[in-house]
Image (spheres, grey):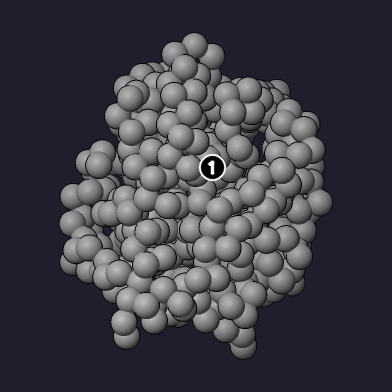
Amino acid sequence: MTNADMAAIVAPLFQPFTVKNVTLKNRIVMSPMTRAHSPDGVPGEDVAAYYRRRAEGEVGLIITEGVGTEDLASTDNLRIPVLREGAPLKGWKRVVDEVHAGGAKIFPQLWHQGVLRDARISAHPELLGRRPSGLWGPLGHNSLDPAYVESVAAPTVPMTEAEIAHVIETYARSAGYAKALGFDGIAIHAGHGYLIDSFFWGETNTRTDKWGGDRRGRTRFGVEVVKAIRAAIGPSMPIMYRFSQHKTQDYAARLADTPRALEDILVPLAEAGVDVFDASTRKFELPAFDGSPLNLAGWAKKVTGKPSMMVGSVGLNNTLPEMWKAGSAPVNNIPAVMERFNRGDFDLVAVGRSLLADPGFARRVRLGEPFVPFDKSVTTRLT
């Protein structure tokens, strides 16, 4: 297949997409990837340049790495960026301006690590990780360091009503900062076993009050976070919501075993104000449920009627956990992406590691050019 043939195949990806008051120039999105290159939570000039290179490489939207909220227990590593008053806001303003100058839109991904926070390495080791029921969750297939698991897996205490209210308010406050800085929308990390996801997962939420109970009851915390952010940013700014079946504690975990169960989880979030669902999966090709070829993003769109975004090893031959064992190699799986995109399964395509390896990945896709070799060391370098 010639470059021109590939360029023709991918042309639909390079049509604009509008959500709320934001129009993206194309459908390729930089997926959020934690980098831990922001000393004391402050993104520097190197971080701004890192994101600008991807903007200049023609992605339509950048979702930043996970960003801690104003809750001091939201993150652990001191080099994870935060959205709090003072120097962090000045750093993020530079990032926003550089990305806009590079021609892309940008959303911060608000992140609270919850049960997965390691207090030992944080600026506030006296603060316990926030947990809906004090439970870390069952240990299944994962790639976690056993020493980390030993330090965090013991049960602690459930969040109090006051703590829940505080955390929700800090999400809203950080979202308000983002709006004032000129970010184009807000992304919420509610997957992978982190705080919001731990309220949804029955293994970590055994509460019997209004924050727990059945599947719908366990959505309440996420719904209230979305409502608070919507109130802080107004009606016109888009909200993107990342969710997943798998957990950091157990890659085989599932929130929903049927489309109806997924509907119970996602519809209340859509009604609360979510505009786009970011369905986090390891491989985009995998069907979410038996009896249908739809992946998780396809089902999110089907059950909510909202736009969705797929992610999962675009441009590479294997998943992130597999990469740590055997490395990864570039592969042109874009035709398989386009087959699903053209039938309307999803609206946006998120790309992670391929954009770490090559800031110009989106341009290569547009031109039908071969992808560059992949070096997994880019996952720890700021390039």
Apparent side of residue 306 relative to residue 183 in the rendered image (left or right):
right
Quarter of the picture containing the N terminus is bottom left
- In the displayed structure, 142 sits above or below 210; it is below
- In the displayed structure, 300 sits above or below 19; it is below
Q: Report the residue at 27% width, 66% height from top.
A: 371
Q: Quadrant of residue 301?
A: bottom right
- Residue 249 at x, y percent in the picture: 42, 53
- Residue 232 at x, y percent in the picture: 73, 28
Apparent side of residue 346 relative to residue 81 in the rendered image (left or right):
right
Apparent side of residue 194 relative to residue 141 in the rendered image (left or right):
right
What residue would you read off at disc 1? 105
Amino acid type, callout 1: Lys
- In the displayed structure, 314 sits above or below 93; it is below
Badge count: 1
Q: Report the residue at 58% width, 51% height from top.
A: 24
Q: Does the image show residue 95?
A: yes
Q: Report the residue at 72% width, 60% height from top.
A: 306
For numbered disc 1, what is the local secondary structure? strand
